[in-house]
Image: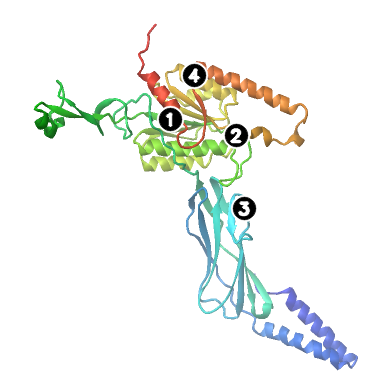
Amino acid sequence: MSWQPTHAQVRAICVAAVLLGAAVLLRRPDAAVFGLPLAFLAAWGRFFRPRERPEVHTELDADVLFEGQGTTYRMRVPESVDPDIDLIVAALPRTLWFQYDPPQAAIAEPVSHGEVRLEVGVRSKRWGLRSLERPTVAATSTVGAYRIQVTSAESQAVTTLPLREGFEAVDAVPRPAGLVGLHRSRRPGEGTELAGVRPFRTGDRLRRINWAVSARTQGLHVTSTWSDRDTEVVIMVDTGGEIGISEGIDGRSSSLDTAVRAAAAIAEHYLRNGDRVRLIDTGSLFRGVRSGSGRAHLRRILDTLVHADRRGRQQDEEQLARRNRVRSDSLVLVLSPLLRPTILGYIVTLVHSGCTVIAVDTLPPDVASIMDLDAHDARSWPLAWRLRLLERRRDLDRLSDLGVPTVPWQGAGTLDEVLRDAARLSAAPRIRS
């Protein structure tokens, strides 16, 4: 694309020609007085028309963000820019779930000696994988006579990870399967967490003898510890549908928003404490994360969660049970609005297999008030929704009878009480029939 005259340049040429023509033909010197300045400006703009096409290099400070974080989209024109270029304007196409600074996502910089830098602040408001479209960059010559549109680089992909809330759980694992975790246990054993000092008993290790206390009490005492525990924590995210309105990190959350953010927070907590975490996405036949531990495993889980809004093939109860086999000693956290019979049936299957299951309710509390009444029958819809909630309450009561607690997600401390109850039940003696 070459330099093209602007509308101002075309108007200046046309008006100057008309006025000068009128001055000659009609012998009107006053018309020449008005036409000569315009002709001079048109000739000036034509004489100083740029010959070279500027190059624009784009870069993004960070292409991986957490919800609410921002980055800077930078556009740079090298120092070799044509000196006859007067102004460079860049505009980013505004995309949903991005907040821009300035709000119009457009910025203009005059060309002076040295390279030109244009910066637009970009803040991501919702998790997911999205792209920033390539900006529209235009360069204008002296007195705004000529303009050229510069094609910049390709669009930039931005990955927004779910916001990891400060989730903590006091009694993290009801039934540990190993002794390699790092969080506090309620059972004594080999570990690093100090439990106290007690008298020596047969079978205690000699290296556990506390010689300072033994010398003071004239009897052997040992230092006891709590066992470090480990188990498989399975996080199952129900992506079968999105209920409610999503307004990003600054507004209301849909059921899918709550499930994804809760899954990220829970995974970070248990992985930080040394447990093995597995992720199951019910919205795909193949997507999921196998059991693992460590910081790299947390990143794998977060990278998988950003694809949760891409609708996939929904699995039925038999497919879930066949493709996602769960160990009987696992702690299963089901993040779901608990409306689909498929999920409720799979929860029952997990309970019968011996798993400790906790259902985390992600249904928005204000879902009834945000429904579009214009799209439904204003008279019958409230009654139908109330009946549906009564059916859901009946299903949750049946799950409670099976020993599956249901708790709404409220951030830190959400699972403390139910985990304590589950730990007490797992420690109680079982009667075999």
Q: CA distance from mark 2 to mark 4?
A: 26 Å
Q: Taking 331 as reference, is 28 above or below it?
A: below
Look at mark 1 in the image and give the residue it sits on. 416
Look at mark 3 in the image and give the residue it sits on. 95
Measured from the top left, where is residue 93 in percent x and y? 63, 57
Residue 1 relative to residue 234: left or right: right
Look at mark 4 in the image and give the residue it sits on. 349
Q: Taking 166 as reference, is 335 above or below it?
A: above
Q: Residue reaching furthest right?
A: 26
| Residues at circles 4 and 3 in contact by the CB criterion of under 8 Å | no
Q: CA distance from mark 1 to mark 2?
A: 21 Å
- Res. 364 mark: 2
Measured from the top left, where is residue 74 in percent x and y? 52, 63
Chain-order first, disc 1 or disc 4: 4
The amino acid type, in three-letter code, at marker 1 is Asp
The amino acid type, in three-letter code, at marker 3 is Thr
Q: Residue reaching furthest front?
A: 216
**From the image, which quarter does the C terminus lie in?**
top left
Task: Describe the element under mark 1 as helix, strand or loop.
Answer: helix
